Amino acid sequence: SRSINLAVIPGDGIGQEVVAEGLKVLSAVLPQDVKLETKEYDFGARRYHATGETLTDADLDALKRHDAILLGAIGDPSVPSGVLERGFLLKLRFAFDHHVNLRPSKLLPGVATPLAGEPQIDFVVVREGTEGPYTGNGGTIRKGTPHEVATEVSVNTAFGVERVVRDAFARAQARPRKKLALIHKNNVLTFAGHLWTDVFNRVAEEYPEVTTEYMHVDAATIYLVTQPERFDVIVTDNLFGDIITDLAAAVSGGIGVAASGNINPSGEFPSMFEPVHGSAPDIAGQGKADPTATVLSVALLLRHLGYEAEAARIEDAVSADLAERTGKPARSTSEIGDALAVRVAG
Amino acid sequence: SRSINLAVIPGDGIGQEVVAEGLKVLSAVLPQDVKLETKEYDFGARRYHATGETLTDADLDALKRHDAILLGAIGDPSVPSGVLERGFLLKLRFAFDHHVNLRPSKLLPGVATPLAGEPQIDFVVVREGTEGPYTGNGGTIRKGTPHEVATEVSVNTAFGVERVVRDAFARAQARPRKKLALIHKNNVLTFAGHLWTDVFNRVAEEYPEVTTEYMHVDAATIYLVTQPERFDVIVTDNLFGDIITDLAAAVSGGIGVAASGNINPSGEFPSMFEPVHGSAPDIAGQGKADPTATVLSVALLLRHLGYEAEAARIEDAVSADLAERTGKPARSTSEIGDALAVRVAG
Ligand SMILES: CC(C)[C@H](C(=O)O)[C@@H](O)C(=O)O
Ligand SMILES: CC(C)[C@H](C(=O)O)[C@@H](O)C(=O)O
């Protein structure tokens, strides 16, 4: 019989609340014969303050034994900026080689967008997750003096670029429109930019059916608000991907519905699924957070583990739920979770 | 008697057309007693193909003797990506220490925006122009092999950050709302991010009347489309500034109206003014380009040289012209220039 052994990291702020709903929907959607085991892990601000730890070797050993990881949110204003991000979130992405950061953007019927008109938005961003300016390379000299110099080194390898570019081409090939855009800034960041462009053009020869285009990141932000229908699959570097996926989330319904997978395609390490939004301490504990992004992250998790039908059921339930929201009073976090659980079970 | 000794660089594509209109409006707005001298320089794709040169030491010596530079656009698909950008545009910004890249965004009445509703947009971005990932530091090893590694080094100095942060605080202090936002990614790019944040917080103490906030660049893209009225002055790094000013231009009327100044505040070297848009080779030579961004760049140029009343006259003329566009047939580049010249003279 089948089983899913899931690591659950509620984390900080609204993380706790949204993860509870994600698990509720997960339990409701899974067929009876699938045994779901979950183990909760304590990471984030509370543990950091209590122990000084963010993510230890023992933690990584324990997490490694799971089939996948569901994360709520990590981050709190009481912790200096960067400590939990570099010490937990990025450490985990690098340790588990999550090189495909998958972020779909789909504007569902009935969902509000800040854009005028009725934009058609349905694309997916494949963001590199283990290289670029995120490596933590760099340093500071003469800190705090008028002569301080601080550097950040973006590291890009043919190995790292090629595997994520290949992943993106395969995804584009599998979609009806078969379009792939490379987003970079190869006219300024010429060393990294030429590597990305060369690898992209080389792999493109193997996918004659995929229509490709190259776009500078600055121009891409314009197209995301003026012609979002232009995009089908996007592949990009770690930092550009961070920036454009927040913008993509904003135009396609907000970060309340933006899901994300930090994927290790080989399966050597468990992949991690999380909403794009953060811990939102201002609304934490009030039942105000929208769990939809977490529920959609559960769908990505299920698809990654091979439960395609269940993933689609969740996505359909979310579509139906969102379509009926207009004009209705706001519901609490658990009310939305309950409604989605009923829909996926029904 | 007063005089302006202007270097004019029409450049590539629509650069020629829009600069002609910029000069037309400049001549029309200047008082009789101001002697305008212009000298045209040949830079861009044509010269690169003919001579292999992008910007020589002799060119820099000649340009240095002017009071200011007006640039149309540089760039053509016939030149490999990066050659003219690094070899001309960035070389000039670095050589003339254009560390304040000023990019105002104002949604004028009657102007279309891709955003729904009636957003209020009136802010200015102060983008650092001589540091960050734009320095060209970095390199490539094992080029073209499966073992290629390419790096890009973002270089940030207390000296470079402080001067642009001070410029931004002074601008915020002079505006009615007195708000300043620092945009960076200090939770990931911790070395550079902490330098920026520390300098920003230190200078803030000297400006108790200025309300400050810090925002990650990814979150900033969300606010730019959901709450653009939130912004008054923004200060940011070279790359983040590149990205968010294109997005800012898109939401506040498009790059057809986005102006830019590459400013050396000390006056040691001439400052350069240019539209944010590029050379748009697809519409070049057809009289289709909107010269408004160039005309507004002329206003920034005049303000920089102390001609405040003339700058304001141009801005008022552009506002009036834009307000009357809706429903009218499209005009040619020179028709728009003519209309603006009439308005500023009148
Ligand atoms: C919190 C931060 C480290 C993270 C990132 O920059 O990747 C977040 O913005 C994201 O997009 O997942
Ligand atoms: C053309 C390019 C070098 C330039 C930049 O990146 O600064 C442009 O995008 C801009 O914003 O002026």
Image (cartoon, coloured by chain):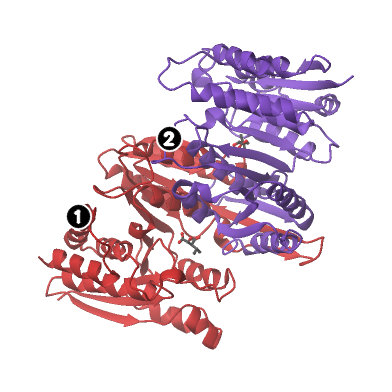
Chain colours: A red, B purple
Quarter holding ligand 2 = top right
Considering every residue shown, the one lying at the far bottom of the view is A50
Q: Residue at x 40, y 60 (%)?
A: A276
Image quadrant containing the C terminus of chain A: bottom left
Give the residue type that dot 1 points to.
Glu
Where residue B70 appears, as percent x and y from the top left, is: 71, 25
Image quadrant containing the N terminus of chain A: bottom left
Q: Residue at x 44, y 37 (%)?
A: A223
Secondary element at tag 2: strand
Q: Is disc 1 on the same chain as disc 2?
A: yes
Kindly identify which residue carries mark 1: A324
**Residue A209 as seen in the image, left or right of residue B175:** left
User: In which image quadrant can residue B87 be found?
Assistant: top right
Secondary element at tag 1: loop
Kindly identify which residue carries mark 2: A213
Q: Nearer the viewer, mark 2 or mark 1?
A: 1
Where residue B223 appears, as percent x and y from the top left, is: 48, 51
